[in-house]
């Protein structure tokens, strides 16, 4: 019985850790998911113009290392890679098999 209970709790915990709950109108959720997927595609193809267009003029991002970046031009500079450098795989969605 103890083993069964432990197994159930383990499976339940893993299920919770891997689940995502979306709240809102379905059309809004789908648009957000599409925008997120499009953004990853822009990063993976070095489409810096479209990356920049993904942000508002007063946008802010919070990089893992460093200060908060403010404004579209500063953020675009952050995402722009040196010539010859390419992102291999940018992934922000839960549906990718990475």
Image (cartoon, rainbow, N blue to C red):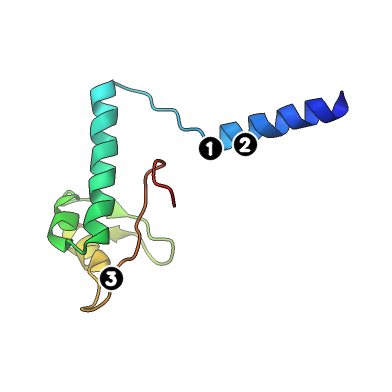
Location of residue 62 by image quarter? bottom left
Residue position for label 2: 14
Using a 10 Å C-alpha cutoff, classify the residue at mark 1 as few (fewer than 14 neighbours), some (14 to 19) or many (20 or more): few
Residue tagged by mark 3? 86
Dot 1 falls on a residue whose secondary structure is: loop
- Above or below, comparing residue 19 to residue 61 in the picture: above
Structural crowding at the residue carrying mark 2, measured as other residues with C-alpha within 10 Å and reported as few (<14), some (14–19) or many (≥20): few
Of 94 and 62, nearer the camera is 94
Cα–Cα span, label 1 and label 3: 29 Å
Graded by Cα atoms within 10 Å as few (under 14), some (14 to 19) or many (20 or more), the crowding at tag 3 reads: few
> Outermost residue toward the top?
25
Say whether residue 96 is left or right of residue 17: left
- For the image, the number of numbered tags is 3
- 14 left or right, relative to 82: right
In percent of width and height, residue 18 lies at: 53, 37
Q: Which mark is residue 60?
A: none
Given contact means CB atoms under 8 Å apart, are the residues at marks 2 and 1 in contact?
Answer: yes
| Measured Cα–Cα span from mark 2 to mark 1 | 6 Å
The residue that label 1 is drawn on is: 18
Tell me which corner region of the image, top left, top right, bottom left or bottom right, holds residue 46: bottom left
- Counting from the top left corner in percent of width and height, residue 84 is at 23, 78
């Amino acid at each position: 019985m103890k083993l069964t209970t432990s197994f159930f709790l383990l499976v339940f915990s893993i299920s919770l850790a891997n689940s995502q709950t979306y709240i809102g109108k379905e059309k809004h959720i789908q648009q957000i998911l599409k925008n997120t997927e499009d953004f990853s595609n822009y990063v993976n193809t070095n489409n810096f113009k479209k990356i920049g267009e993904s942000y508002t003029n007063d946008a802010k991002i919070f990089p893992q290392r460093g200060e908060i970046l403010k404004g579209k031009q500063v953020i675009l500079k952050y995402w722009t890679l040196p010539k010859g450098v390419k992102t291999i795989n940018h992934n922000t969605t839960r549906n990718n098999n990475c």
